[in-house]
Image (cartoon, rainbow, N blue to C red):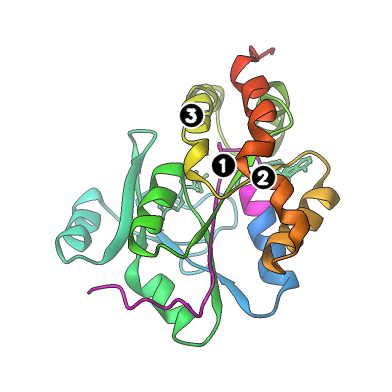
Amino acid sequence: MSAKSYTDHRIIVVSAPSGAGKSTICRWVEETFDNFDISISHTTRKPRGDEQDGREYHFVESDEAFKEMINQNAFVEYAHVYSRYYYGTSWSSITDILDKDRNAVLDIDVQGAEQIKARFPHAELILVVPPSMTELARRLRERKTDDPEEIKRRLDRAREELTHAEKFDYILQNDDLDVSKAMMRNIIEQNPEAKSMRIAAMQPVLDSLMNESIDG
Ligand code: ADP
Ligand code: 5GP
């Protein structure tokens, strides 16, 4: 399938190091703005907690089944995340939303965000970053969804992901959640205040995160 331009419809891509808060922010957008829907990705990882097939993800039973979908060009983008599981955005997960005259929110990793921009140049890319790497480690532990080895893997990867920040239209530092929601509203409502989240203004924040060592 080729990309119809769909330029009248918003495609907002939210990426972040794991634990920085992108799912929290995406869910808030879907609940708060009645014309935005979260695109549901496919993954080979198993459901966690009360996750349900077709709600958080379309759970694919094997790598082979996922690769078969790749061969059928089902995906706009896909990635092998943490060298363990496949995750992918199907064409239909986006176009089903846009064809209903609604706007799409994507909660995907940094590599996926860049690929979405290549296919849909008007997509707006937002990188959510934590207040500090130490707080990121704390949130991952508190979330209690990953074992210590997985948390270490996610922290190691977090710094690498920050090196892609210049590909993003906006950097949102998720410290106080209410402030983050207000900043997200500025992007969605295209308010001039959103300019303060452009990379040029946010470079000192990124530098500080990159230079921080992770305690505990
Ligand atoms: P991601 O989707 O980026 O991996 P989540 O949205 O799952 O991250 O958030 C990670 C954890 O941090 C969750 O337990 C969430 O409730 C919490 N969290 C998210 N935003 C904030 C915030 N601004 N302040 C404190 N905790 C937060
Ligand atoms: P989790 O296992 O915590 O749900 O997600 C792990 C990572 O995979 C997160 O960074 C999440 O944003 C990313 N992810 C989820 N869906 C997709 C997708 O369709 N494509 C890509 N590239 N990454 C995804």
Q: Is mark 3 within 8 Å of ligand 2?
A: no
Q: Secondary structure at mark 3?
A: loop
Disc 1 crowd, CA 10 A, few/some/many (<14, 14-19, 20+): many
Mark 2 residue CB less than 8 A from any atom of ligand 1? yes
Q: Quadrant of residue 194?
A: bottom right
Residue 57's label in the rendered image is none
In this view of the protein, which residue sits in the foreground, 25 or 124?
Answer: 124
Q: Is residue 81 above or below residue 120?
A: above
Residue 17 percent across, percent down from the top left: 56, 36
The quarter of the picture where residue 80 lies is top left
The quadrant of the image that shows the N terminus is: bottom left
Residue topped by disc 1? 16
- Asked if the residue at label 1 sits under 8 Å from ligand 1, the reply is yes
For marks 2 and 1 on the same chain, the one whose residue lies earlier in the sequence? 1
Task: Determine whether, in the image, residue 68 is placed left or right of residue 80.
Answer: left
Vertical relation: 78 (above or below) 89: above
The first of marks 3 and 1 along the sequence is 1
Q: What amino acid type is highlighted by mark number 2?
A: Gly
* Res. 163 mark: 3
The residue lying at 62 percent from left, 49 percent from top is 22
Q: Say which of 216 and 169 sits in front.
A: 169
Residue 29, x across and y down, in percent: 69, 65
What numbered label is drawn on residue 21? 2
Element under disc 2:
loop
Q: How many marks?
A: 3
- The answer to whether the residues at label 2 and label 1 have Cβ atoms under 8 Å apart is yes
Magenta stretch holds residue 46: no
Of label 2 and label 3, which has the lower sequence position?
A: 2
Range drawn in magenta = 1-24
Point out residue 55 in the picture as x, y percentages from the top left corner. Answer: 53, 68
